[in-house]
Image (tube, helix red, strand yellow):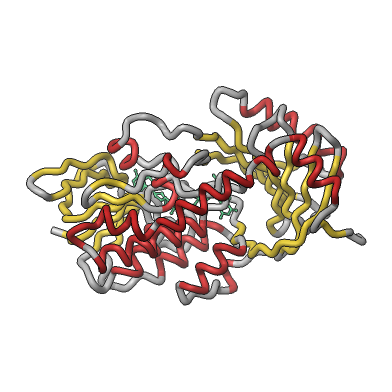
Amino acid sequence: MYDIAIIGAGPAGATFARLIGTKYKVLLLDKRELLNNEAGSLEKCCGGLIAPDAQRMLGKLGLGIPQNVLVGPQLFTVRTIDMQQDIERYYQRHYININREKFDRWMVSLLPSSVHVACGALFVRYYFEDGVFKIHFRNNGKEYIERAKYLIGADGAFSILRRQLLPEPFQKTYISIQEWFQVKNQQPYFSAIFDDEISDFYSWTIPKEEYILLGTAVLPEKNTTQKLELLKKRLTKYGFEFQNRKKRHGAFILRPSSAKQICLGRGNLALIGEAAGLISPTSAEGFSYAFRSALALAQSIQEGPDNLAEQYLKNTKELRMNITIKNMKAPFMYNAFLRKAAMKSGLLSMDIYA
Ligand SMILES: Cc1cc2nc3c(=O)[nH]c(=O)nc-3n(C[C@H](O)[C@H](O)[C@H](O)COP(=O)(O)OP(=O)(O)OC[C@H]3O[C@@H](n4cnc5c(N)ncnc54)[C@H](O)[C@@H]3O)c2cc1C
């Protein structure tokens, strides 16, 4: 039997496992093959930008990103385009541009050898009997059961653990699609694109070596493919070309419109990262929330193992407050009138001489 079983070896699960891995007997399960050098068929769909909050957390966790995880160009500017009001502005912001798949593999490579990592293992469900979690998962077509005292859900936006715990769906769940296009001339900006006809959230472009990623996040009832085609058409006016498509993938993104939607777990079952609903409701930046919640849970399990839920609630107070503050700022980005006023004022924007 394990002390702790963690479902999901993304940024949240791998960070938590690294922080507690030498003190407890830990099992870390992931359906992806994260121990090989080459990406398998299951890749996490992500923009792969490490924003300043996440950079700060990496620093706090004593980590520096190795060169083979970085991709060019490194980005210092956000190009903000309001398509309906035809205004654009450039803002200074430094992102670290990474290969997301390599980033996840690197995080798993940092785990102490005492952590048992089971890759290619699809978690199916759990049962709680006699104070112990029975964890059912599949590997190569066979079903297995493992037991643990604590069960940690780090299985992302579509968390099976969260859905087993709370049957009602997360209130605002978006479908995001990203397409990769090969380009000759790269625009060295992260573009954030606002257009209410396409999404009440936002769309983006991100340069990655010889590719440009085009992504959008829409609510499920909307016709995602049609919206993406409209987005491409409208963006040609701003100098973008999307012709030579190499890849298309998708994922869910949660958008917590209130800190009350965050689900941290119950008893000895805890949720971290996006499984808990922890992600920025304004930018969909999720790395910093994955790291912060993993650290908060690692501290909680050491400070109050017999009272984990209460301790974890206490240790995530600032994180939950952060979601509330982001939601208070949201109208300046997502209300067309306020956004227009902010962009027109030119406050904090900069001129580009390209
Ligand atoms: C299109 C898109 C672009 C994004 N771009 C950015 C960005 O540029 N910067 C940023 O900061 N954030 C970005 N985000 C958000 C960010 O990707 C997530 O918030 C972050 O990855 C959350 O980390 P996590 O560890 O909680 O979950 P995840 O990274 O989703 O990891 C969950 C892990 O659990 C595993 N798993 C899931 N279900 C099972 C199961 N049943 N059995 C076994 N394993 C399972 C998965 O394989 C995965 O490895 C983006 C999200 C999307 C969808």
Is 18 on the left-hand or right-hand side of 289?
left
Q: Nearer the viewer, residue 170 or 316?
A: 316
Give me the residue at 68% from left, 28% from top.
227
Q: How many marks?
A: 0
Please determine whether, in this image, residue 93 is positioned above or below residue 135.
below
The residue furthest left is 130
Q: Quadrant of residue 334?
A: top right
Give me the residue at 29% from left, 53% from top.
152
Is 237 on the left-hand or right-hand side of 35?
right
Q: Position of residue 111 (x, y in %)?
A: 36, 70
Tell me the quarter of the image containing the N terminus: bottom left
Is 332 on the left-hand or right-hand side of 300?
right
Q: Quadrant of residue 149?
A: bottom left
Please determine whether, in this image, residue 15 is positioned above or below residue 220.
below
Is residue 120 at least partly visible in the picture?
Answer: no
Tell me the quarter of the image containing the C terminus: bottom right
Give me the residue at 27% from left, 41% from top.
141
Is residue 143 at least partly visible in the picture?
Answer: yes
Q: Position of residue 347 (x, y in %)?
A: 81, 55
Q: Position of residue 328 (x, y in %)?
A: 59, 45
Give me the residue at 25% from left, 59% from top.
27
Q: Position of residue 101 (x, y in %)?
A: 51, 57
Please determine whether, in this image, residue 306 is positioned above or below residue 332.
below
